[in-house]
Amino acid sequence: MTLISLGADPLPSHTSRLREIDGEEVVIARWSPLDAHIMPHGGVEVMKRIVARLARTPASETTHHLAPSEDPHDPEACVAGALAHAASPLAIDFLLDQRRRLREGLSTPVAPDHAAVLRHLIDPPLIVAWGPPNVGKSTLLNALARTEISIVAPEAGTTRDHVGVLLNLGGLVVRYADTPGIRPDADPAEEQAIDIARSLVSAADLVLWCSDRLSERPALPSTVASIVPLDLRSDLGLPAKPAAFAVSARSEESVLALAFVLREALVPIAALQDPGLWAFWNA
Ligand SMILES: Nc1nc2c(ncn2[C@@H]2O[C@H](COP(=O)(O)OP(=O)(O)O)[C@@H](O)[C@H]2O)c(=O)[nH]1
Ligand SMILES: [Mg+2]
């Protein structure tokens, strides 16, 4: 999202609408006769294209990323700031509704466990795949990125704390880090990669604990916030005692089902449907 000066645009102040700019659907909210926020539903690449397109018009970009919580005494400004840099499309409606709740004087807060996970709408949570080599971890990432779930910003350095690939899992943008897997005869370069993987696991919001029908799930190197055990390459068969979510990269249906499970594990629908006030500026 970006804040721009639009010049002579007919959209009245304090209104918003859906528009198409170069084939991309965007929400435009006009705050004053000269300024508007543009919220593309795509990722960073889409935003870059829109900014480039606007550069060829009388509009000028005035700033990126209003910092949230700039003034905790002005919750509406905090919501506008969070809207400006929220990573997930799912955040837009939820944050806009917070504004309505503020205006209606609602003071009942969202449940504390919901408040914690809703933070993921603004700052993409980290998913790390951990498991032995050759069970299909990298292929799974490719499969996730090739379905309706898009890669949002493949190049490094495009967001704060960017690690891995940004994926849009049905409206929730996540950072996804693939890891090489532990090999007993690892060379020094592999050891280094495994050390990095260990530190990623300890920083993860969710670990995909992977194996396939023939392999064991390797011990996790640290405690983690949340774990989803996976049996990968399920089209080749399942373990004798299946106790995990079965996925085959060859089945788009199972990959989409996994995306839903991951989204639900990170930001459950119940949190999105919490009717309370999400006072994240006080957190
Ligand atoms: N049949 C089948 N083969 C797969 C699947 N996923 C990966 N593979 C194959 O398994 C091998 C190892 O996959 P890879 O993603 O490199 O494993 P990683 O080392 O865990 O990242 C490759 O030959 C893949 O083509 C799957 O879902 N089904
Ligand atoms: Mg791999």
Image (cartoon, grey):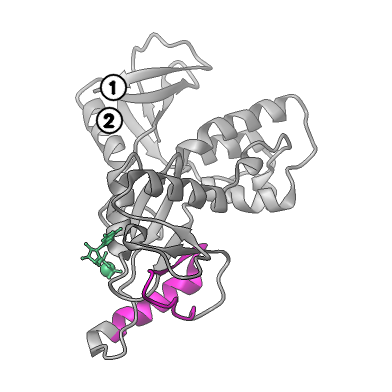
Q: Which residues are magenta?
A: 191-220
- In this view, the residue in front, 218 or 276, is 218
At x 67%, y 49%, the residue is 115
Tell me which label, 1 or 2, sits earlier in the chain: 1
Q: Is residue 100 above or below residue 239?
A: above
Q: Was residue 75 drawn as part of the magenta stretch in this picture?
A: no
What SS does tag 2 mark? helix
Q: Position of residue 231 (x, y in %)?
A: 42, 64
One can see residue 29 in this view: yes
Residue 273 lies in what quarter of the image?
top right
34, above or below 43, in the image: above
Q: CA distance from mark 1 to mark 2?
A: 7 Å
245 sits to left or right of 176 = right
Q: Is residue 210 magenta?
A: yes
Relative horizontal placement of residue 217, taking residue 82 as reference (left or right): left
Disc 2 designates what residue? 50
Residue 142 shown left or right of residue 27 in the figure: left
Image coordinates of residue 88 in percent, x first then y, are 46, 42
**273 or 132: which is nearer to us?**
132
Question: Which amino acid type corresponds to the residue marked 1 in the rendered image?
Answer: Ile
Residue that badge 1 annotates: 21
Along the viewing direction, whichever of 280 and 173 lies nearer the viewer: 173
